[in-house]
Image: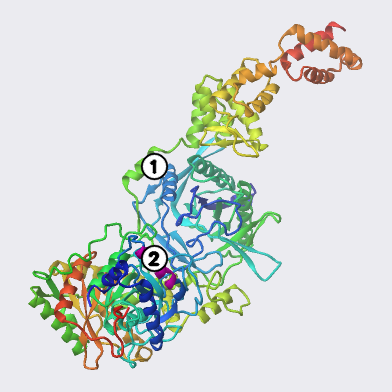
Amino acid sequence: MPDQLSRLAAAVRTGATTSRSLVERALAREASARALNAVTSVTAAEALATADAIDAAARAGAPLGPLAGVPLLVKDNICTTDGVTTCASRMLPGYRSPFDAEAVRRLRQAGAVIVGKANMDEFAMGSTGETSAAGPCGNPWSAAHVPGGSSSGSAAAVAAGIVPASLGSDTGGSVRQPAAFCGVVGVKPTYGTVSRRGLVAYGSSLDQIGPLATSVADAALLLSVIAGHDAGDATSAAQPTPDYLGGLTAGVQGLRVGVPRALLASGVEPAVLAEVERAAAILEEAGARVVDVALPHAPVAAPAYYILATAEASSNLSRFDGVRYGHRTGDAADIDELYARSRAEGFGPEVIQRILLGTYVLSAGYYDAYYRKAQQVRTLIIDDYRAVFAACDVLLTPPSPSTAFRTGDASRDPLQMYLADIFTVSANLAGIPAMSLPMGLDGQGLPTAVQLSARAFREPVLFQAAAELERRRGALPSAPGYTLFDGADA
Amino acid sequence: MSSTESAWETVIGLEVHAQLATRSKIFSSAPVAFGQPPNSLVNDVCAGLPGALPVLNREAVALALRAGLALGCSIQRVSVFARKNYFYPDLPKGYQISQFEQPICLGGAIPYELDGEQHSLRLTRIHMEEDAGKSTHTAAGPYSAIDLNRAGTPLVEIVSEPELHSAEHAAACFRELRSILVALGVNDGNMAEGSLRCDANVSVRRRGDTTLGTKVEIKNLNSFKFLRDAIRAESQRQIDVLERGGALVQETRLWHEVERRTVPMRTKEGSADYRYFPDPDLPPLIIEEGWIATVRANLPELPGAQRARLQQQHGLSAYDATVLVALEGAVPVFDGAVAAGAPPKGVANLLSGIVAASINEGRLRWDAAASAFVPVAAGPAPSSGRVDGPRLGELAGLLHDGVISSNAARDVLDRMLASDASPRRIVDEAGLQQLSDTDALDAIIREVIASMPDAATSYRSGNRKVLALFIGRVMKSSSGRANPGLVQERLRALLAETE
């Protein structure tokens, strides 16, 4: 179902359907899929009021935006003025933001209707959706498997057809990996493309908000709405937003597709590796040239990532101290105890573990050995990509060494779980765009996917290659027991 | 200097925090102001809300550049904001954004004068940072009050080399730094409100030693007197400890004004580890050569140069020059008056006399935009009554030419504040001309002598002191208009004549 978002918005604009019916459908789907726990909070009243206003505008013939009347979910670490922003943490119960995130402001301006907040790993820390204080989010494809994370609810909700698309955030793969595990498209844009204002920070130098959708065209459209310079984010890129939609039907004739075969030779599940080779073959058949490339520093990317991300997180999460907002302990004799208890009670174990790790690597005497060295590794990885993208236009890898993990695996072997981020973290370290595209199902009936990445700000070529791959790959089934959000009965 | 004291050398370095006089905060558009209701100048960035991001205020950078260029620093083309991490209730984000490894300015010096000699204190660096909020701990309840109005106010920290050797030098140097920053418009110089704060690092060593002794930091010395007194007391304390065979600990102390000694500040166990790292929310600050050139081209004349010019070009005494330069607005008004042809010394006297007095009394204030002193009104700012160079110059001319007496000058100034009429017209209309007509004056004097026969007798019998009584009475009878010199002369003559 390509162009689902533009089709729905067009139907609202022309009166073929109403935003109210789309929003009601999303709310009904959320209610019937509650067992998935993909949504932490719903703002039904606000969403219906917005939908009615859009419908009234449509009837009046007023100009409406490209997402007119379309219901969406945003991850619960993206600030919205309606409803709450909890980061799926006991630290922020009922926290109401006085401002909309810039990405949300742009969504609303384009006519989108935000129906609620998507479940996630607490403070975006986790790759299974299991660290949420709101309880684990399920994978629509299998009750025994996780949806991935940290944007677990954003991916699961789209796969379960609660909404046609959503926003997640990606610090080390948190959009792409759950998208892959749930069989939807997920994009991590070039750093600086989407404003981070209103995104509760995890690793500020790595975080990007990105779209999740059922097709490449929808992801491209959603990104074109939320992308753009924001003077309120000093790391926002000043350059004009490229046209993401124009190249979707351009094909891949002459495009150079790089595959890091040496890197993929070990540690990757055969079914996952097979999908990469199948994607390479499809692209080659479509006229692309497949070249072998090397990413010599990829094996140290995950350790460097976990040092830098946790270092930044340890500082970013200092503001949650129980003084001005959020959880405050009921039992403290002095200020130091107030900090210690409020934080110990408010943060879950994964968050505490990462704050401790980050605090450690920044400490006097360890800074050079960890933080500074990790920054040096980051530079080496940027150099790796410079060389790679001199030899190819698009890099093809898996998003994860495996399909969806079994529930509970993360707590059994946390280190193994960190290392599973090997294929996603590099794009965050280098700031380049990357996306994951569903390819089919493995032997267990779990979604498989490939990851495409490109040079900074070259999302257009990413979408161009992904769209061709999507066409040639053919239609995929939806998760058993679910249908994608198509508004057909609206 | 006592013999034991002379065996020791005091070593002092200064760390001055100066708030930059911007309209908004360093990383957000929240306004900067003093004395507003608590937490009324706070937005999402100041409060450290989730998802809030800092954006650097370029005006703050421009002011830091101004300070750096005026003090002869080397401006760093690339500087980096870092996070200094620590928990405190008035630090909303749990970290302070401050330049650490790569500050905006390196080197430079503060030129200053003491006892007629020129000195200079070398600077290590100037870096930019944000101020914290304010905590108020009351005995009343189990709570502390937090006011975040100050949180995010832009600061520069000016750090000197440890190269001063006396409290007098430290005070003179800090005083000059203050006047430079005020002249630049970088800082308002208000130490009472905390917009300029000085810490002193003090150590002592045996004269001749080349290594530094154990350093003690004295915090929040918010007047020149406190700075001087605290350094004196602290250096003597350190000498006493060492002479008794004791050892000093590196620590932070505060000046206790009442007990006139430094006292230890509460310290946390172990040394703080601030875990500095570059702030990922703020890209490195890149300063283009063109920006530096623009700021440099717009630097005003600095106090040292002003003092020299006032003395050399206009013949003022060193004292007069110092007084004028220290009075905000006095030099531009002086220049305007002298350019209009007024006598320099006369203008300087008016400025350091009745103008300064009117400012101290809260009736007059400097308005930089108008480049004039303006009346302080209860209601909205009055549009008339400005005291600019030409107007003050005309007043000085009237005084110099003997048209009015120095007593009357004060009256004329008061009337100038209430109208836009020229001083000459004010004098004419109010009849404030000096009485220099001998016949008219003699008539008044004769009347006064006649009314004080006892005093006249006393004077004639040799008690010359009673002359003052007569002068006072004559000035009163003439409504202050009598020329005081002429009054004395005629009184003597007439008292002798009727003897």
Front residue of this view, candidates A50 and B100: A50
Cβ–Cβ under 8 Å for marks 1 and 2: no
Q: Is residue B404 visible?
A: no
Front residue of this view, candidates A148 and A369: A148
Q: SS for tag 1?
A: helix
Front residue of this view, candidates B311 and B67: B67
Q: Is residue A459 left or right of residue A405?
A: left
Q: Residue at x 58, y 77 (%)?
A: A337
Q: Amino acid at mark 1?
A: Val
Quarter placement of the C terminus of chain B: top right
Which is closer to the viewer, label 1 or label 2? Answer: 2
Q: Is residue A238 visible?
A: yes
Q: Residue at x 11, y 79 (%)?
A: A282
- Which residue is most to the right? B454
Residue wearing tag 1: B295
Q: Is residue B69 magenta?
A: no
